[in-house]
Amino acid sequence: MIIQENLTIQEKLKILTDAAKYDVACTSSGVQRRGKKGHLGNSSEAGICHSFAADGRCISLLKILFTNQCIYDCKYCVNRCTNDTVRTAFTPDEVCQLTMEFYRRNYIEGLFLSSGILSTADHTMELIYETLYKLRNIYCFNGYIHVKSIPGASRELVEKTGFLADRMSINLELPTAAGLRELAPGKTREKILAPMRQVQQGIALSGRLLGYDRGYRKMFPSDRAGFAGGASLIQPELTGKDLLMPFGKADSPALALKERHYGTKAFVPAGQSTQMIVGATPENDFQMLSVTQALYHNFGLKRVFYSAYVPVNEDSHLPSLPGGPPLLREHRLYQADWLLRFYGFKAEELLSEKKPNFNLLLDPKCDWALQNLKEFPVEVNKASYEQLLRVPGVGVKSARRIIAARKQGKLDFDGLKRIGVVLKRARYFITCSGKMEVSCSLDEDHITSALIGDERRKIWDIENRNSYRQLSLFDDMHLEEEKNSLLKDQLVKEAAGSAAFGQL
């Protein structure tokens, strides 16, 4: 490990923004583009990333590591202690200076701060706390801050940091305890889940004492006086096989949180999130989705992020990926995650032990619908909101619009299209006034072939996200035929040019 000293803040920024790019709790821009006369906007790759607020706004964040030094030897991590790479670390004042200067130039609206483990977990967490304290109280920064909790740090430091941050997260990394032992021997589920439980209970206690729910939108009933110290916090049990879970009463005692701050200031008001690596260990999609469901249900997480495993190290414990990172599998997990959070699906409805992995040719909702054709067709003028959400091509917004619009009169297919329903998928599963759209039938083979045609285009886009090609009116994805045809045309033109030259 090469530890560099006496680096400029710009040199540190270049090293520590590059080291932070594998954390997918937000999306990095990855490009450097200055403003031009006659054009609007610019883009910077030096740590600028984008996240999305609850209302859909895109927020630019300064995304950096406090340090890329680490005492752990996680096999999949580019910052593992056995890697021979340049190491450096910011000081709390340097992070504050960068954040304020980027903010004054209108490059960012907030800070995303993660870190390797410098010396000890408590020492690193103390430096992060000092950074946030100075930002809030000395530099008077009131913008958004997302900070990573350090596994193994003391409860007191996690608590103090939680009152300064808007969101906290701690990476679950791998869904099973066995995978964690194999690839991240320095980490244990207790080190990861204990602060996650602490943040969950702190959010609940703070919300109760301040009189709001965890989303800070609706008032609770007036029971503040009767709520004492967190003793009434419920510890839900998780049933199922021991993946990285369960984490219930047996190994998660009540934290006995004190009220001294929770009733006067919001604790982690934007909630907490986590990240799992996809494809580094042999767990199937059903196992990963079951863990995700347990995290939402038992730990009250805002988001679970998925990161397709990228081979940055050579190690016998790591899998070989001849087809590259499993980007399509990551995409399917995100789609299923959306169904869990907003559409009322459960993990056991989408997958099972007999069918443990997602269909790569169909999105999870379409695949579920084809496996449950007995539930269809759904009459849009009579179906409940829950039934509408199960229809492929009908989203949360369009389902609400259908409920509102049909109070004014009966809906037809043209009306559904104007509402925002994706008819190229929905038309196979719905009726309007008892009639299906012309040429549609409730036949599994017919529907499957029609839906797979659209999905193949999406699959190509996901697997070739860094490739570009000119679209044509006859874009049927026959890439090899198109390549051969272009090559043939080029040879014909060259032959014709040679002939013309010979005549001269």
Image: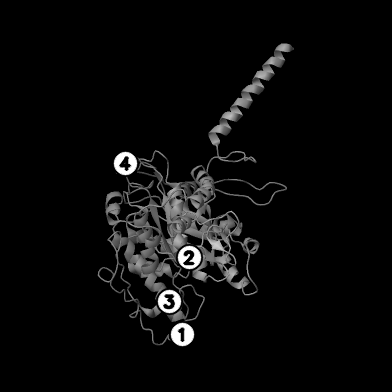
Spatial CA span between label 3 and label 1: 15 Å
Indicate the colouring scheme.
one colour
Q: Is residue 457 above or below residue 203?
A: above
- Indicate which label's residue lies in the foreground, 3 or 1: 1
**Quadrant in the picture for the N terminus:** top left
Residue at the extreme right: 504
- Indicate which label's residue lies in the foreground, 4 or 1: 1
- Residue 435: image location, x then y, percent: 58, 63
The residue beneath circle 4 is 315
Amino acid of disc 2: Tyr
Q: Is residue 121 above or below residue 249?
A: above
Q: Secondary structure at mark 1?
A: loop
Q: Secondary structure at mark 2?
A: loop
The residue beneath circle 3 is 206
Q: Earlier in the sequence, mark 4 or mark 1?
A: 1
The residue beneath circle 2 is 343
Q: Earlier in the sequence, mark 3 or mark 1?
A: 3
Asked whether disc 4 touches disc 1, contact meaning CB atoms under 8 Å apart, the reply is no
Q: Foreground residue, 486 or 37?
A: 486
